[in-house]
């Protein structure tokens, strides 16, 4: 954690909706004239696509059916912590990109399933923005949470998360429902032990809850829309949060606990704008004073 070089970390599993949160922050950064350098959690995977496939086969041969990208050991978390620490101290660092598909391959000049080379951040950034799987990990080897100034969790109810992942992977990656289901089952152990514990570290959690039947996510024909959802927003420390202001500005919202507010799903972007704009302004103000 550094007042001079702040870090915002958005954490959630595949299909949770972290990309949507990033898009909202991009709007805030443009409007508030904040120069942010962004890094992706995928850049810190330990293996490229073919290496991961080989590692999965090797582990399966030893009886380990739980290894996945969610697993700590599938990622270079010590490198991610080094990037967080270095940025907090100096405003410098480096990252790379994992190339998912042909469209990204054309952009980056690297084959799908491979990484680009490590490259230094552009100089003069105001803050570092992370979006990925492991932005608030605390374990025996690393403590990423201690380096981030604002930690955000994106955690839909589990059936909705699965529906979103199934539809995304089928549409954008050409996977079958059966293939995505196998991935979900393989990731469950690490989801419980590596992903979920991070959400006690996050400062603000967003949990989308559908109000339509999602009892069998593996046959759902559509992803529940924003208007078919509620969002529970939980603040780890509610001190300083102006709940009367939020409930007056977000029509249809109400408080359920002293640190929690529920909003209509269609008001999520508005809620994030109202909540995070003053937080970003505060971080930038303090960094410039420092």
Image (spheres, rainbow, N blue to C red):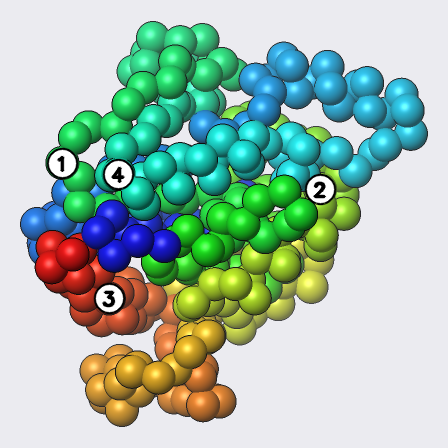
Give whichever of discs 3 and 4 has the lower sequence position.
4
User: Which residue is disc 3 drawn over?
Assistant: 279
**SS at circle 3:** helix
From what the image shows, is residue 113 above or below residue 84? above
Residue in the image at 52% along x and 63% along y: 201
**SS at circle 4:** helix
User: Which residue is disc 1 drawn over?
Assistant: 124
Give whichever of discs 1 and 2 has the lower sequence position.
1
CA–CA distance in space, label 1 to label 4: 11 Å
Q: Residues within 10 Å of mark 2 (few under 14, many from 20)?
A: some
Give the position of the C terminus as an image quadrant.
Answer: bottom left
CA–CA distance in space, label 2 to label 3: 34 Å
Q: Nearer the viewer, mark 3 or mark 4?
A: 4
CA–CA distance in space, label 1 to label 2: 38 Å
Residue in the image at 48% along x and 54% along y: 145
Q: Which of marks 1 and 4 is in front?
A: 4
User: Which residue is disc 4 drawn over?
Assistant: 90
Residue 195, disc:
none
Residue 218 visible in the snapshot? no
Q: Where is residue 170 in the image (x, y as percent from the top left)?
A: 56, 34
């Amino acid at each position: 954690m550094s007042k001079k070089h702040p870090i915002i970390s958005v954490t959630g599993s595949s299909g949770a909706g972290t990309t949507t949160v990033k898009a909202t922050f991009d709007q805030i950064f443009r409007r508030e004239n904040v120069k942010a350098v962004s890094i992706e959690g995928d850049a810190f995977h330990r293996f490229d696509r073919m290496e991961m496939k080989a590692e999965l086969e090797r582990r399966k041969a030893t009886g380990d059916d739980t290894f996945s990208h969610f697993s700590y050991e599938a990622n270079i978390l010590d490198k991610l912590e080094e990037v967080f620490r270095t940025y907090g101290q100096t405003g410098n660092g480096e990252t790379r990109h994992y190339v998912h598909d042909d469209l990204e391959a054309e952009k980056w000049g690297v084959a799908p399933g491979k990484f680009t080379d490590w490259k230094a951040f552009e100089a003069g950034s105001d803050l570092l923005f992370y979006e990925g799987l492991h932005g608030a990990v605390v374990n025996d080897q690393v403590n990423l949470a201690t380096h981030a100034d604002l930690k955000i969790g994106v955690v839909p109810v589990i059936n909705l998360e699965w529906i979103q992942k199934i539809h995304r992977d089928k549409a954008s990656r050409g996977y079958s429902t059966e293939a995505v289901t196998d991935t979900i089952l393989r990731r469950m152990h690490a989801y419980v032990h590596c992903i979920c514990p991070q959400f006690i570290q996050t400062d603000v959690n967003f949990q989308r809850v559908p109000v339509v039947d999602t009892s069998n996510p593996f046959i759902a024909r559509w992803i529940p829309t924003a208007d078919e959802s509620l969002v529970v927003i939980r603040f780890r420390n509610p001190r300083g949060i102006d709940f009367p202001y939020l409930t007056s500005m977000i029509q249809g919202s109400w408080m359920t606990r002293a640190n929690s507010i529920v909003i209509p799903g269609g008001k999520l972007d508005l809620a994030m704008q109202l909540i995070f704009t003053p937080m970003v302004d505060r971080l930038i103000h303090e960094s410039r004073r420092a």
